Image: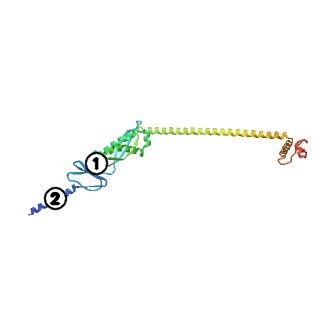
Amino acid sequence: MEGLMKNKKILLLVILVLAVFLGVSSTYSLRENEYGIRLQFNKIVAIDESAGLYFKIPFIQNVRKVPKSIQLYDIRPSDVMTSDKKSMIADMYILWRVVNPTVYYQTLNANVNNAKDRTGITVYNSVKSVISSMTQDEIIEARGEKLTQTITSDANPDIQKYGIEIVQAQLKSLDLPDDNKQAVYERMISERNNIAASYTAEGESKAKKIQNETDKQVAILKAQAEKNSAKLKAEGEAKYMETLQQAYNDKDKAEFYNYIRSLDALKVSLSGTGEKKLMLGKDSELAKILYGKIE
């Protein structure tokens, strides 16, 4: 009787262990940053994308968990060649994530190392393609966000067929080899100085041209003004001579004109301070004025 009871306890314990095992084997949980790829005989039967508890058939189905979050892959520095056949060293890292877990499993077996290898190759090819289309000087000037965006955009179409998206292919450095770095920088400085000198010379030439044109206009205006002045002076003198002639042609006007001129001469002679002595002939016009003998 005791043996039977003991066997029953063992059986119940076995059943309990099996139940727990089956319960654990038939469920799985996902976090917010995970995909769940449910497989049956290595074929996808379901893709679970939300966090929570899920069921599967024990022993027949298994689950491959894939990260949703952005992954970092730091690729090793590599040599690249510019369009003008200059060597540069590209050092960069890649931010990538899985966007299509089905394709990711079918092409890369949902393996992170496989994904890193593939993204590294794809991005390196894009870096070579972009850099080979630019001169060394253009690359040095364009280093930064613009160049990063160009490489990222170039790499994404190729990597998306693996269910992956490249968020950013970021250049940490794109530098010259140590043996020719200084020579290139000195050449660039020399070229920039030549360009600056060219702009300065061009500016001075334009300034000289403007100055010459201004001087020309001033000379034209001055000549025109002098011409007009001479014309007005000549007209004034002609008018004066005409008036004078008319005065002398008329006896009354001539006498009045002589009288006025004599008064002007007397005024000039007596101007100033102190005593004045005048030596006048008795027949002079001034004497006639002073002695009241004007006829």
x and y percentages locating residue 284 in the rendered image: 89, 42
Q: Mark 1 points at which residue?
A: 102
- Disc 2 versus disc 1: distance between alpha carbons? 37 Å
Residue reaching furthest left?
1
Look at the picture and state if 17 lies above or below 280: below
Which amino acid, by three-letter code, is at mark 2? Answer: Ile
Report the colour scheme.
rainbow
Q: For the point 61% across and 38% down, which residue is it? A: 213
x and y percentages locating residue 203 in the rendered image: 55, 40
Q: How crowded is mark 1: few (under 14 residues within 10 Å), some or many (20 or more)?
A: some
Q: Is 66 on the left-hand or right-hand side of 140? A: left
Assign a secondary structure to mark 1. helix
The disc label shown at residue 15, or none: 2
Which amino acid, by three-letter code, is at mark 1? Answer: Thr
Q: In which quarter of the image is the N terminus?
A: bottom left
Residue closest to the eye, 231 or 151: 231
Q: For the point 32% across and 47% down, which residue is it? A: 164
x and y percentages locating residue 228 in the rendered image: 71, 39
Residue reaching furthest top?
85
